[in-house]
Image (cartoon, rainbow, N blue to C red):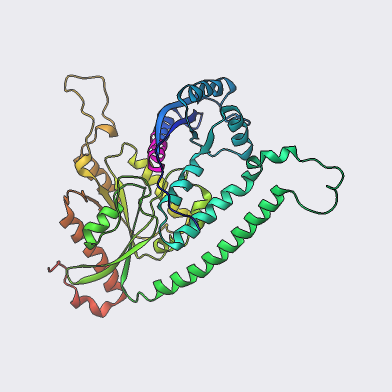
Amino acid sequence: MLERQNTDYEKVVLIGVVTRLQDEDKAAEYLDELEFLAFTAGGTVEKRFTQKLDVPHPKTFIGTGKLQEVLAFVQAQEIGTAIFDDELSPAQQKNIQKILNCKVIDRTNLILDIFAQRATTSYARTQVELAQYEYLLPRLSGMWTHLERQRGGIGMRGPGETEIETDRRIVRDRIALLKKKIITIDRQMSVQRGNRGSLVRIALVGYTNVGKSTLMNVISKSDVFAENKLFATLDTTVRKVVIGNLPFLLSDTVGFIRKLPTQLVDSFKSTLDEVREADLLLHVVDISHPSFEDHIASVDQILDEIGGKGKPVLMVFNKIDAYTPEVIDPEDLVTEKTEAHYTLEDWTRTWMSRSNGDAVFISAIEKDNIETFRKVVYDRVRNIHVTRFPYNHFLYPEEIQE
């Protein structure tokens, strides 16, 4: 099993490309996110490198000239790791490592590393280990370069397998074992979820680091681990919450991220069963982030992949205390008003009309507007409960009675 490790901060460089599908602003935004990922994993970013390419180089991802520039910086500053913003093929990783002579990892590997650090329960560790082995399997050849010195000849002929084949077999056996283990745990968790009876289930979903666990702590008065880093939550936490006299179950789930590795989506499907089986989704959004609308689109796409689309959703715009719009000078007659200049009132009007009123603006840390949030959630849960048990409506009044 995976062991938790405390990492010392190491020097890293970030490398990304500007392509036809990814302009400079988008590339810079992805590198900001990658820098936060690197910091979460235990790295300090010394420099960023970007290059304009129509498509990434098939052998070295970036051009050879840019790679020499990175090499000069890596040698001068004694950099330990080069992190690429997109997934590298096994051949690219091997070629780059040969040139730079330092650790070379990509975004997928970095996310897997953070998950390995953060996994606490046996279930989460099993899922992360499975994802890591699936990522590792096609990359084993690059790790056994000493095998290039193997020779045939007298005493070396006949049946047998090389060390690389042995390793592949061991990894495949391990993957098969972990998949069986996950099926067993899935069955146990399915029984657990079935035992929760007739209570309405609500799941908190959203991008990573938007404040889901903080909101969970505020509503349920519990002590779920929350931190201003990416992927602070890996294990689904379920709490019974009572608003007024109406009880329901609230689940805190793992946060999503753009360019989420497919291995992780697959191995965390069982954690996301909480989302699939929920009666209502609270989609938490960090409105203070400049690209929060892109985050919403990413979460919607992943929900679609895991079968959570089509459920009732309440948009919860968090961190209103940290939101500051750009201001246009009254004498400036050239600059056009864009979404960057929207005030909270503008966003409230926009999203209220977009979501048919299913939006609420709060600050979980400052507890701004929490009472309005509780009232909205109470109304939604009451409606679901009364629909399911029509003769129980008199138990739960339309107004919250504390």
Q: Toward the viewer: 8 or 16?
A: 8
What residue lies at 52% left-to-right and 64% top-to-bottom? Answer: 182
Q: Toward the viewer: 281 or 39?
A: 39
The reply, left or right, for residue 38 in relation to residue 384 is right
Q: Which quadrant of the figure has residue 247?
A: bottom left
What span is colored magenta in the figure? 32-41
What residue lies at 22% left-to-right and 76% top-to-bottom? Answer: 393
From this viewpoint, which residue is outermost toward the left? 402
Query: Does the magenta portion include 37?
Result: yes
Q: In which quarter of the image is the C terminus?
A: bottom left
- Residue 34 sits above or below residue 311 on the image: above
- Residue 50 position, x and y percent, is 47, 26
Q: Toward the viewer: 185 or 156?
A: 156
**Dominant SS type (magenta):** helix
Query: Does the magenta portion include 107?
Result: no
Q: Toward the viewer: 272 or 234?
A: 234
- Residue 376 position, x and y percent, is 21, 59
